[in-house]
Image: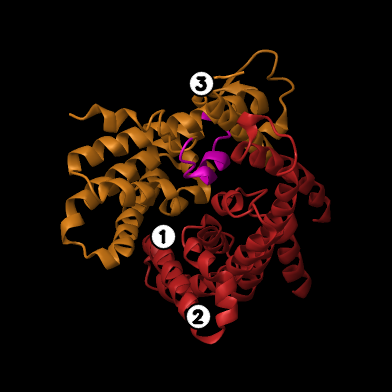
């Protein structure tokens, strides 16, 4: 077991904050923790499926048509999770809206297919997918904590005392997403630079 | 009818701006907004592809998927159509208008993974728009993206000479600026 492939995605090569892939869903659906985890699980499922299949078929796919092939594989998994969520978690599916089918153009998925699954064994690709998926979910949850608590006065749907009566609505709207994301990214950069003052 | 189309157009550009309100197409918005001329190239290319994609995906949805009850193939067929459309547009422009290709060339392949393009196609279907409405909504969405990108590029050219704290340089300050722009765009909500 190569644990490095698993852990790198969670922090050191975090897809959102470091590689800056997949910012759109990170900003758009991070309005509550429930949405963030829903999106994280959906993206991880697609990542896992596509990484596994692509690493299995990589030898038999001609290099020239590999991108369209990857897109078909990814779109298949996206359609599966989309229909699955619509059937079993209709409320979540409704609040994530078009961002579920948009996982197909989420750069993380195609990026990992091209940068990792294309060159590595199925085993490593699964670990990579789980790590990247976890990193994506954690990043989403980090943004969502600030936005849900400050903008909605709730933590995982539970009202937070003091804030719940007068939340700062702006935080769950688009600008709040931009602000929280920008500040978190600056913080990550500051830590990466050794926390120099 | 024409008033409806006009309001779809205005709403798509200003009120439901793809970048600043719907949060779609953030990657190119941050990636290509560092210079005004590249912002113009990307904005034009995206607008062009969005209108084409809006019309073509509407046709696929209503002439092919819906009559045969194949709606579950929507995501798959839309993304394949957009990807091949981008390739096709690239070839046509290279053959027919070399000067335009020079200006747009490098941005065209990037558009396939621009979620605003697939986003507008999906939104047209979800809102139940007809062919003309879809085209107008796509055009408005594309122009809105162009407008936001251009504004951002103008601001970033000024930011380059500003004194920004080290950790905030680059992407973080761009996001903060985008947040302020998004607040400013809420002012347009009164237009509706």
Label 3: few (<14), some or many (≥20) within 10 Å?
A: few
Determine the CA span between mark 3 and mark 1.
43 Å
Q: Position of residue B144 (x, y in %)?
A: 69, 60
* Mark sitting on residue B75: 1
Q: Are marks 3 and 1 on the same chain?
A: no
Numbered disc 1: what chain? B
Task: Please state the horizontal and vertical placement of residue A40, each as a whole percent of the image.
Answer: 42, 36
Sequence-first tag of 2 and 1 = 1
Q: Are marks 3 and 1 in contact (CB under 8 Å)?
A: no
The numbered disc on residue B94 is 2
Shade representing chain A: orange
Instruction: Residue under label 3, please give it.
Output: A194
Where, quadrant-wise, is the C terminus of chain B in this rendering?
A: bottom right
Residue A170 lies left or right of residue A185; in this view the side is right
Q: Is residue A25 magenta?
A: yes
Height in image: A81 above or below B114? above
Q: B16 or A115, which is in the foreground?
A: A115
Name the secondary structure under disc 1.
helix
Residue drawn at x 54%, y 62% is: B117
> Quick one: quadrant of the N terminus of chain B?
bottom right
State how far apart marks 2 and 1 are (Cα): 29 Å
Mark 2 secondary-structure assignment: helix
Based on the displayed image, in which of its 4 quarters is residue B146 positioned?
Answer: bottom right
Magenta residues, as a range?
A: A18-33
Q: Residue at x 68, y 64 (%)?
A: B143
User: Which is more foreground, mark 2 or mark 1?
Assistant: 2
Q: Which mark is residue A12?
A: none
Q: Secondary structure at mark 3?
A: loop
Q: Quadrant of residue B45?
A: bottom right
Residue that appears at 71% across and 32% down = A169
Q: Nearer the viewer, mark 2 or mark 3?
A: 3
Locate residue B91, reporting x and y percent: 46, 79
């Amino acid at each position: 077991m190569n644990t490095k492939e698993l852990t790198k995605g969670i922090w050191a090569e975090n897809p959102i904050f470091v590689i800056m892939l997949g910012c759109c869903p990170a900003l758009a659906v991070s309005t509550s923790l429930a949405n963030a985890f829903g999106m994280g699980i959906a993206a991880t499922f697609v990542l896992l499926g596509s990484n596994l299949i692509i690493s299995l078929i990589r030898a038999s796919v001609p290099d020239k048509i590999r991108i369209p092939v990857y897109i078909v594989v990814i779109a298949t998994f996206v359609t599966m999770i989309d229909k699955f969520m619509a059937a079993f978690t209709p409320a979540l599916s409704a609040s994530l809206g078009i961002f579920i089918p948009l996982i197909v153009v989420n750069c993380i998925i195609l990026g990992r297919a091209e940068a990792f699954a294309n060159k590595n064994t199925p085993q490593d690709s699964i670990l990579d997918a789980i790590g990247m998926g976890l990193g994506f979910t954690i990043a989403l949850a980090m943004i969502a904590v600030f936005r849900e608590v400050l903008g909605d006065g709730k933590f995982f749907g539970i009202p937070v005392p003091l804030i719940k009566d007068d939340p700062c609505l702006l935080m769950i709207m688009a600008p709040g997403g931009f602000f929280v994301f920008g500040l978190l990214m600056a913080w990550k950069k500051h830590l990466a630079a050794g926390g120099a003052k | 009818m024409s008033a409806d189309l006009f309001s779809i157009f205005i709403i798509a550009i200003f009120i439901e701006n793809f970048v600043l309100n719907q949060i779609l197409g953030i990657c190119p918005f941050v990636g290509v907004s560092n210079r005004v001329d590249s912002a113009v190239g990307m904005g034009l290319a995206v607008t062009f592809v969005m209108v084409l994609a809006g019309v073509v995906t509407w046709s696929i949805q209503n002439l092919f998927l819906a009559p045969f009850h194949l709606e579950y193939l929507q995501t798959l067929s839309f993304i394949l159509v957009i990807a091949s459309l981008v390739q096709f547009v690239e070839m046509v422009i290279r053959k027919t208008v070399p000067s335009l290709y020079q200006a747009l060339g490098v941005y065209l392949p990037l558009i396939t993974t621009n979620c605003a393009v697939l986003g507008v196609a999906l939104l047209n279907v979800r809102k139940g728009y007809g062919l003309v409405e879809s085209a107008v909504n796509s055009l408005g969405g594309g122009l809105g993206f162009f407008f936001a990108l251009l504004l951002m590029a103008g601001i970033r050219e000024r930011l380059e000479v500003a004194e920004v704290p080290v950790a905030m340089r680059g992407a973080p300050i761009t996001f903060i600026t985008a947040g302020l722009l998004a607040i400013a765009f809420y002012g347009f909500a009164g237009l509706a």
